Amino acid sequence: MARAGQIETITEVLARRDRAGALIFGPAGVGKTRLATECRHLAETDGRPTEWIVGSYATQNLPLAAAAAFVRFGVRLSAAPGAGLVGGFERVRQALVEKYDGRRVVVIADDLHRLDATSLELLFHLMAKRTVVVIGTVRTGDPVPDSVTGLWRAERMVRVDLADLDRQDFDTLLHLALGGPIEAGAQFELWAASKGNPLYVRELVMGALEAGTLIQRDGVWHLEGSLPHTERLGDLVAERMGHLDPRSKAVVEILALCQPLPLDYVVDLVGGGLSALEESGRVSVSADSREVTLGHPVFGECLRRHIPPVRARELFRQQAERLESQGKLSRLEQLQVAEWRLTADGHADSMLLIEGAQAARLANDFRSVQRLVNALPAEYRGPRSWLLLGEALSELGSCEEAERTLARVHWRGVDEDVLLRIVLTRTNNLQFGLCDSTAALKLNADAQQHIQSEPYVHQLRTNEASIQLLSGRPDRALGVLDGQVAPDESVRTIQATVLVPALALAGRTREAVAISADIARRTELGFDVTSGLLGVHHSNHALALTEAGRLTDAALRARASAETAARVRLPKGQIRFALQLGRIAIVEGAVATARRFFAEAVGLATTYPFAGLLGIALAGLAATCAMLGDLNAAREALKRREALPPFGFLGPEQELGRAWTLAVAGEKVAAEECFLNAADLAAATGHRTSEAWILHDLLRACGRNESGRLATVAAETDSALVTARADHAFARRAGDADSLVQAAEQFLGLGARLLAAEALTSAADAHRRAGSQRRASEVSRRAGGLAATCEGARTPDLILADTVAPLSRRERDVARLAATGLQSKEIAARLSLSVRTVDNYLQRAYTKLGVANRTDLAAALRATP
């Protein structure tokens, strides 16, 4: 629970007679009043009497204004100084003692530092007599009377400093407030805007919900468009800013539009007033004392809304002139000047726009690239500007428009470096966005007739391998790269973007991990490994680790990279890493988590329509929904996927969604056919680790054991995960309990909890069949403990994990279908059995489970209809 530590501290204070109370210090909106309210509720629950008083600027100079809460005691207080006032204080104390039978009263003093002086004296008197214990809130940055600060300095009260929420508490708050997970990029945007301030978070979320920009798709919240700022939020910021002198107001307006600003420049503008602005939290000076920003990110948007347009344009123009007067500009400064000139004047120098767009491209700020290039006059647009615009459109999901834009550039008269980048961008766009690998291969082949420089020729060969990989042929990708010697380190690094995933899927995981780990190491040491491809390298590293069975390492790499992609709002990168995390989670056994990641990818790939990635995401969503027993959601995901063009990357694996849905629906024959077709496709295209996954899931979902084929795949690969799958299948075929337990240990060592739980369930069945009930119970309990960590997975082997008597595979199949409401005739048709045989299996299941009818059967199986 958020603030649990602070609540515990304050409740301990309330229980001690030697303490007068607690003071909660914190900035505005951090949740001081909320925390005090929660503590009051806990005190009342514990049977303690409570009172509430509030200080304010309006009543700070009115004697005893805050003591109005005590008037109902019938005690007349005089504000006159001297013994009469002290006597009045004592009468109040006596009235409290009588009213609450001598029990100490918990007084919540909200904004304690704003109580009038006489009310403070009354409170101190009651605290000294131990008649009350006080929980006071104090706003950091506001003037606080020495009498208040002296309370905690003298250790009469405990000081509790309340900061903004940390990232973990912030994520928890968002999840609870929205009733479900939120897409990582939207989550980061809310974090960046609020910095964990609970009040600001609430206003931003409420504003987005009211404006309809925060929407839910497949159970995951997405932010479409910018965060709207409510009038209430504007009022809060205005209150925080308060009255500013003209020079200070000018500074905060410039910061709202153009932050950060150099410290020296701000000092020239505001002089000594900067210290007051910083102390009040209105502005912030960087740790190295070089830059000044507003004190909180939310201030900027609220302030910008109140700056008149004419003045805003003039301020932008002034700041552009200031930077231009410095001479040579950094990339960031080039981008700033281009943006400011365009905003101020509606146009800018064409060279400035191109330089700004190039700077934005290097910063992966594709939205700025699009805006700046679109501002170029038509006569200044050429191959480089079309390239920049096409890259931006492609990265933002406008794939058809990107293809039209890039196709404007003709082969002749274009520099080879520009031509190469156009070809690489177009082929990538044709595959991820338009799912047309045939057109991509033709375009790449045509380019080889026009590009002759050796490094570029090698890159085109690597691009050919990439197209083969993304079209679903890792075997052909490796064939293209086989024997190709790169002329330099840069080209070798580019080749690795294809070589690593192709090797990993081929089962040569040690090579894949070694190459990707070397690239990751060089990245961390600061070497330039083609910065635009860093996200691809990191994604490939996670894939290689996953195929090798190093699930924990894979998840760490994918999570770190997903955070980076979310921070800069790169849609394709966000989708790619959401898919990686979903894929890892499903192997780990965190099925609901996997569903969440696939749903996040679906939502993003719908907003930014990358058809290829959307197909993979929908397949993963269908598989996880089926494993959780949600057949309706699984079927809906498959229906949406059918409307998309096929995308080859991980193509065999994509069939797992359909196969699992069929299996859980009880359509065993169709499910087996789907699994086997997918496995054959994997074998034919070089997806050896995928082949093992599919064959193992065939065993898990349908009970069909292809242990011999799995053993062959394991012998031809070096993946620990493939080996564990093969060993499990062999143990299942042998029905040997000890071997099944060993298989479970292998899975646990890799972090695959669900697979381990299923293996242990089979081991418990084997022990029971051998007559070892005690051992069966031990193993079954362990299986149940692991299954409880798998987030509600309802795979066939887990459904009966807690039953006393073991069911045969066929009894399980019949029982599961009967629990969904199917009649014997329908079950017989699905399983290719006679009705009489179905009824016999059903009666045996009733006997073993101790139930009498189909209604009770559903409860016994814990099946989801």
Image (tube, grey):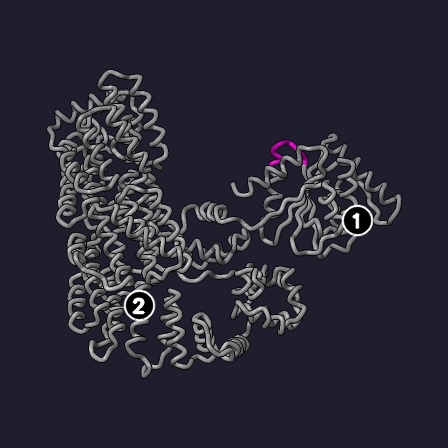
Vertical order, 598 against 102 (above or below)? below
Circle 2 residue: 391
**Residue depicted at 15% across the width and 55% down the height:** 479
| Mark 2 residue type | Glu
Give the magenta part as a residue range: 42-49
- Is residue 44 within the magenta segment? yes
Residues 458 and 608: in front is 458
Q: State the CA–CA distance, disc 2 to disc 1.
A: 68 Å
Vertical order, 667 against 391 (above or below)? above
- Is residue 565 within the magenta segment? no
Label 2 with label 1: CB-CB less than 8 Å:
no
Circle 1 residue: 118
Q: Position of residue 513 (x, y in %)?
A: 28, 48
Vertical order, 123 against 499 (above or below)? above
**Residue depicted at 34% across the width and 24% down the height:** 781
Residues 581 and 801: in front is 581
Asked which quadrant contains residue 776, the reply is top left
Indicate the quadrant containing the C terminus: top left, top right, bottom left or bottom right.
Answer: top left
Residues 439 and 555: in front is 555
The answer to whether residue 671 of the structure is visible from this angle is no
Q: Is residue 816 left or right of residue 14?
A: left
| SS at circle 2 | helix
Q: Position of residue 92 (x, y in %)?
A: 79, 39
